[in-house]
Amino acid sequence: MSETTHMRDSWGEARLAAALLAVDPGLGGAVLKARAGPARDAWLETLRDLVNEAAPWRRIPAGVGDEALLGGVDLAATLKTGHAVQRAGLLDEIRDGVGVLAMAERAETGLAARLALALDSAPAPMLIALDESADPDEGAPGALIERLAFHLDLSSVSLSDLNTAPPGHDREAIAMARVRLPHVENAGAARALTQTAAALGINSLRPPLLALRAARAAAALEGLDEIGEDQAALAARLVLGPRALHLPHEDRPDDDQTEDQEPDAPPPDDEAHNDNSEPDDQPEDQPDDAHTPDELTEITTEAAKAAIPAGLLARLEAGVSNSRASSAGQSGATRKSGQRGRPAGTRRGDPGEGRKLDVLATLRAAAPWGRVRRRGWDRLKSGPALEVRREDFRIKHFKQKAETLTIFVVDASGSLALNRLSEAKGAVELMLAESYVRRDQVALIAFRGSTAETLLPPTRSLTRAKKCLSALPGGGGTPLATAIEAAEVLAHAAARQGRTVTLVFLTDGAANVTRAGTGGRDVAQAEAHDAARRLRAAGHAAIIVDVSKRGAETARSVAQNMAARYVRLPAGNPGALADLARTAAA
């Protein structure tokens, strides 16, 4: 199959998925991975043409507040009537309709939970989650992915694919399929799709149930009374393939077992065979083109395997799970803020000291009490005046992601200098290459002789980092205590600015220079342990990378005093070091 044909088939199956959603809204909806453009607009228009024309169609912003989503007090009506009048939210408006969640990859957990609850309720809306993420580890929240039948990727669909596509289904065909849908029989598809889901590592019952609904809708759309091989395979491709967590295991003949079983096989008994009439009767009842349950399972499994997206297939073949675990260093911890960030709702409180008054929410809180509070206030009895009291004040709350800072503290003394500095330099450059999108910053401290020097202040600039790291010094003693204290100062400064800090020490933990810059191994080691314990109290995430060839007890001791993760990396590389730093920040 050519690449062009494959793209055209992808667009064709995406349109078919829209038709299946129109036939059975119980499929929940779809995750539509595509940037804003003609392909995404064309798919949404296709769906809108097929669903019930009376069904409401609303756009849901990723940052929508609870009041807009769930409803609240209608201020104008409340002031006019003198008693609380509730207005409907977006979820009430899209019951039996369609909600389009914009930028679903930015949806907060709370919004995902509220939408998931609506999808589990009756009547449930259909939800289309628009996913514009560029990173494979990002995407729509898991609670929504679980409940939406189709995961469609339109990123490879071009204008020519749209222009050359044949006409699709019309609303009349959808209406006929809806009438036929309740009468479609499963015909063994439930077993095959469930076993296929298990073979792909899908451990939830929702995907095979959604696949079965998709197969029934496909059969109804084709005017069939039961699910056939093609409809089961289509459901496996559209619903199960994109959800694969690992590749199905291939059945391999057990040679030893076969050899052991062959001698035990009963010899042919012509007389017994002649007395048994069942084999002769069975072919008459079995259609020639019918498949056994195992054969149907094999067909659906192969169909799902063929539909695994290319990027996901490469990850599965490399042994990487299809779980969207949070990437370390991808973003810092979420912090509440009263001044800036993403809106995170409104709460009762006093404005001032940077807290912003939500005027509308305050008026809505006061409005239901208008008639009660006007009693005894003669001059305002006839008007819609509103008395706002302190308990009505509502202030805005925001959430913002804290930036992350990874501080590499590198032992540049003596023989450790050349290799360790080279690895640290490579790791810094690797992390900085991703920092612009992930809001990471990187700093580097090298210690040697009698001092610790900040060679690279916190930065997100790869160009600046390369310039600073071009000529790293090396050689001399090991002032480990001085290095830990320098890292602590830098970490505290970053934490005060709201950054999440991770410290990565590359050392064998053997100190031989004191804080005063004099020699003395025992005193220097004791000072290093004291500095490590003080850093532990600060609570920053830390990792000790033991760079000695056989593992040093001194490095373990420093890690214990610092409550840091201890890792041996005697022959590391920049990529492994960068991965360790990201893991430490998780």
Image: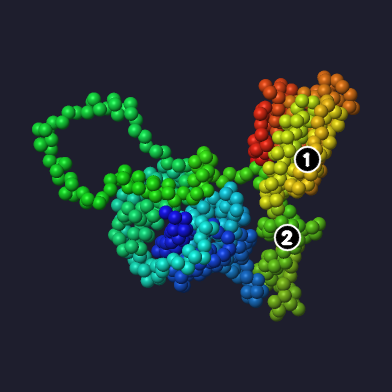
Left or right relative to 516: residue 412: left
Q: Image quarter for residue 249?
A: top left
Which class describes the residues within 10 Å of circle 1: few (<14), some (14-19), or many (20+)?
some
Q: Nearer the viewer, residue 488 or 36?
A: 36
Amino acid type at mark 2: Ile
Q: Earlier in the sequence, mark 2 or mark 1?
A: 2
The secondary element bearing badge 1 is classed as: helix
Secondary structure of the residue carrying tag 2 is: strand
Q: Is 98 on the left-hand or right-hand side of 451?
A: left
Q: How is the image coloured?
A: rainbow
Per the image, the residue denoted by label 1 is: 469
| Residue tagged 2 | 395
Disc 1 marks a residue whose amino acid type is Leu
The residue closer to the viewer here, 297 or 26, is 297
Q: Is residue 41 above or below residue 152?
A: below
Image point (53%, 43%), residue name:
315
Q: Position of residue 143 (x, y in %)?
A: 53, 51
On the question of residue 549 being in view, the answer is yes
Quadrant that contains the N terminus: bottom left
